Amino acid sequence: MTFLSSNNSIKTPISFWHKYHFLILLVIAIVVKQLPLVSIPFNWLESYFHEISHGMAALLTGGKVLRIQLFANGAGLCTTQGGSNLIISFFGYAGATFWGWGIYKLASTHQRIAQLFSMFIFGLIVCSIIFWGKDLLTWFILAVLAFVFILTSQLQKISYLQRIMQLFGLLILLNSLSSPTYLLDGRHVGDGAALASITFVPEIVWVFSWFLLAALALYSLYKTAKK
């Protein structure tokens, strides 16, 4: 079925999926996030990108990464030496948001780019296992994540890979949206407390800035999808 515009040009109707794919994937991501067992690998995924962002910030500011640890409950720890403490502390949550946004954005660009980026992430995780993983639990979690990305990159229908990568991006962003709020537990530990001690800016300001950054990233993807 086609539609004629007033200038007689032919317009192709937009399918339901193409019109609402972002919202469909977002609803799926929200549901997956609520499932106790199914959500575990995706919590690990956000935690990994959080910690690797700390590590990259350390490397880019002249420091080095000593160790990355991931825990079964989705928590993580990146031990660094040198570099800018302010930038390193800030870019855990901010970096995870950037990764989530970037994964969705690149996966949406082209099927081949989605495949290449999936393989790049696989390579990054393997490097993390070799250079920064120091314990069995971290090795196991990283191996699970590496297996997920190498498996998705080998899908016969690359269009499926695009959707899976987009879903990964949204799950990371949803975790980036909610995880900073866990810092508001009155214990004054973590990245927000570290930044507060460095800058004398209250911890809640940093938590709000990370929340706002993740919200803006989600909104920008929604606006792009509408076009």
Image: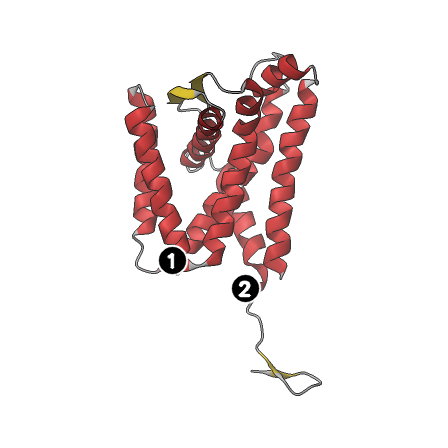
- Dot 1 amino acid type: Arg
**Image color mode:** secondary structure
210 is higher (above) or lower (below) than 152: above
Q: Position of residue 226 (x, y in %)?
A: 63, 59
Instruction: Indicate the secondary structure of the residue bearing disc 2.
Output: helix
Instruction: Identify the residue shown where x is 59% and y is 35%.
Output: 177
Q: How many marks?
A: 2
Residue 201: mark: none
Q: Is residue 210 left or right of residue 113?
A: right
* Towards the viewer: 74 or 128: 128
Q: Which mark is residue 112?
A: 1
Disc 2 marks a residue whose amino acid type is His
Q: Which residue is mark 2?
A: 18
Query: Is residue 31 visible to the viewer in this orientation of the structure?
Result: no
Q: Nearer the viewer, residue 141 or 24?
A: 141
**Badge 1 vs badge 2, beta-carbon distance below 8 Å:** no
Q: Quadrant of the N terminus?
A: bottom right
What is the x, y in percent for residue 147? 30, 40
Residue 202: x and y, percent?
70, 18
Q: Nearer the viewer, residue 13 or 208?
A: 208
Residue at image point 33% right, 46% down: 119
Q: Secondary structure at mark 1?
A: helix
Q: Position of residue 120 (x, y in %)?
A: 36, 43
Mark 2 packing: few (<14 Cα in 10 Å), some, or many (20+)? Answer: few
Q: Residue at x 56, y 66 (%)?
A: 16
Q: Mark 1 or mark 2: which comes first in sequence?
A: 2
* In the image, residue 128 above or below residue 186: below
Camera sees residue 100: yes
Residue 110 image-quadrant placement: bottom left
Q: Residue furthest bottom?
A: 8
Identify the residue at image location x=62%, y=62%. 227
